[in-house]
Amino acid sequence: MRAGRTTRGSRSSTWDRTRESDPRRLRAARRLRDQAPNPAPAPNLRELVSSLGVGRSTKSDVRAALGEGTVVNFDSGYEVWVYRQPAVEKPPTPAAELVLLFEPSGILSKTRVR
């Protein structure tokens, strides 16, 4: 049994043909690509902030609009919720981040997008 091209004197052509050059694989990959649904574009964080009302939106309003975020609780009763949007461009740009500050009463008091 021969080990392949790594052995001197091998006549195996296993490594000469790459998977990418196999026409059957290329056709199958194209079919899968064409059948896959296009993902919905991620909403812009700045647009989401405009839909939230500082001083009137509650935690439940934000949770319904954005889902669960990363929550940081403070002893004073304030909470910070962080939402991160992954970078989609190449080369990668820094991911967008939405930071929301809630008062102890549960009302949104400040927002920041960076």
Image: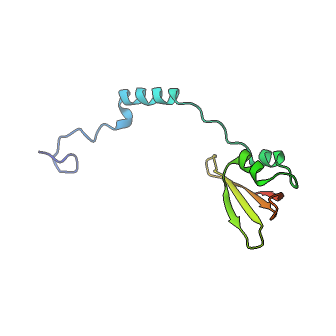
**Is residue 44 something one can see in this rendering?**
yes
Left or right: where does residue 9 sit relative to residue 39?
left
What number of labels is visible?
0
Residue pictured at 35% horizontal, 31% vertical:
22
Left or right: where does residue 91 sit relative to residue 1?
right
Asked if residue 46 is positioned above or below residue 31 in the image, the reply reads below
Q: Residue furthest right?
A: 55
Residue 38, x across and y down, in percent: 59, 32
Q: Residue furthest bottom?
A: 75
Residue pictured at 79% horizontal, 61% vertical:
102
Q: Residue furthest left?
A: 1
Please name the colour scheme applied to the rendered image. rainbow
Asked if residue 76 is positioned above or below residue 94 in the image, the reply reads below
Asked if residue 94 is positioned above or below residue 13 in the image, the reply reads below
Residue 87, x across and y down, in percent: 64, 50
Residue 81, x across and y down, in percent: 72, 59
Which part of the image, by quadrant, shows the C terminus?
bottom right
- The residue lying toward the viewer, choosing from 76 and 92, is 76
**Is residue 94 something one can see in this rendering?**
no
Residue pictured at 82% horizontal, 45% vertical:
51
Residue 73, x across and y down, in percent: 71, 67
Q: Quadrant of residue 28?
A: top left
Q: Quadrant of residue 1?
A: top left
Residue pictured at 18% horizontal, 51% vertical:
7
- The residue lying toward the viewer, choosing from 73 and 96, is 73
Left or right: where does residue 100 sit relative to residue 95?
right
Q: Quadrant of residue 99?
A: bottom right
- The residue lying toward the viewer, choosing from 93 and 47, is 47
